[in-house]
Amino acid sequence: MDAHKGLALEVAALSDVGCKRSNNEDSFGYDQASEIYVVCDGMGGASGGEIASAAAVAEVIRSFSESPGDGATAEERLYDAIVNANARVLELAQADARLQGMGTTLVTACFDARRIVIANVGDSRAYFLRHGACHQITFDHSFLAEQVRNGTMTEEAAKASPLQSLITRAVGTGESISPDLFDAELEPGDMVLLTTDGLTRYADAPEIAQVVGNAADLQEVCARLIDVAKQAGAVDNVTCLLLRAVEVAGNTAAA
C-alpha cells in the first residue's frame, strides 16, 4: 500500500459462487497504485454475465489508472471510467449475438487524498463503517428500492417480493449511463465495504457492523460476511471487497 497524505488503504476481497449457482457472474478487481477498487454483478444469458462483469471491472481500472490526474477531479475520472466501461460492455454485446442483452451492476471507490469517492450503477452497494456503526452509502437502482423510496411499498413487502433482481440501471445495456457519486472524509480505522446483492439480501447495515466488529484480518472478515449469506441459503453469488484506512508515516525528502 502507498502512503497518501498520512492515510493509506488496506484491502481484501473474496467472491463465492453461493449455494445455488453453478457459475459466478460476480467480478472484482483493484489497483492499489492507482487507488481504484471495483465490484460488479453481471447478468445475461449463457456466459454473458461473467463476461460483462469482468469486462466492466477491467475497463474501469484501466481507464481510471490511465486517466490524467492533472486538471480532473476524482469524481470526473471515476465518471469517465464508468462511461468507458459501459461502452466496452455494449461493444462486446453487439459483437456477439449470444451476448446481446448482457450487462452488469457496478460499485466502485477511489481514494483521493483523505477522501473516498464512491460511484454505483444498479444494486451493488457501498457501506461506510466507523466506530462500530455501519451506514449504506449508495442507493439501489432497482424496482423494489425505488418503490420503497417513493412510498408505494414497505420495506417488508419489498423483502418478500419475487422481483429482487429487477434493476433499473445497469452497465452495458444502453448507450448512456447515469452513475450516482458520493464522497466522504476518511479517518484512521474507517472501513468501506463494496458488495453485491448476494450479501445484502441476507444482511442489513447493523448485521454487517456486527460481523465486521474490530477484526484485524480483513480477508477473514470477507469470509465471515460470505458465510452469513451462505448460512441463509445464498441463492446468488456473493462478493465482498473491504477497505480500511490506516495511518502511515509521512514521506521525507532525501537530504
Image (spheres, rainbow, N blue to C red):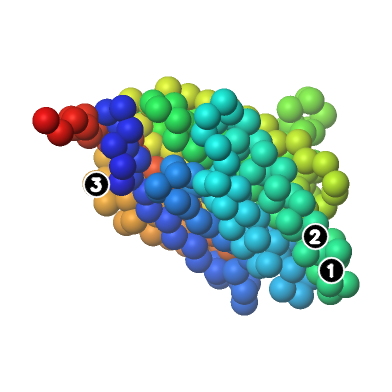
Question: Which type of secondary structure does the marked residue at label 1 adopt?
Answer: helix
The amino acid marked with disc number 2 is: Glu
Indicate the quadrant containing the C terminus: top left, top right, bottom left or bottom right: top left
Label 1 to label 3, Cα distance in Å?
46 Å
Disc ID at residue 8: none
Residue 204 percent coordinates (x, y):
52, 40
**Residue 206 at least partly seen:** no
Question: Which type of secondary structure does the marked residue at label 3 adopt?
Answer: loop
Q: Residue furthest front?
A: 255
Depth check, front residue: 210 or 129: 129
Q: Residue at x 70, y 36 (%)?
A: 179
Q: Quadrant of residue 244?
A: top left
Tell which circle, 2 or 3, labels the residue nearer the N-terminal end. Answer: 2
Q: Residue at x 59, y 58 (%)?
A: 58
Instruction: Give the class, few, some or many, for how many residues have Cα within 10 Å of label 2's Cα (few <14, many ≥20).
Output: some
The amino acid marked with disc number 3 is: Ala
Residue hosting label 1: 95
Foreground mark, 2 or 3, reads 2
**Left or right of 227 in this view: 1:** left
Question: Which type of secondary structure does the marked residue at label 2 adopt?
Answer: helix
Label 2 to label 1, Cα distance in Å?
6 Å
Residue 97 percent coordinates (x, y):
88, 72
Give yes or no for contact between labels 2 and 1 (Cβ–Cβ under 8 Å): yes
Instruction: Give the class, few, some or many, for how many residues have Cα within 10 Å of label 3's Cα (few <14, many ≥20).
Output: few
Residue hosting label 3: 216
Residue hosting label 2: 91
Give yes or no for contact between labels 1 and 3 (Cβ–Cβ under 8 Å): no
In this rendering, the answer to whether 220 lies above or below 168 is below
Q: Quadrant of residue 236?
A: bottom right
Q: Residue at x 44, y 35 (%)?
A: 111
Q: Residue furthest top?
A: 185
**Left or right of 172 in this view: 37:** left
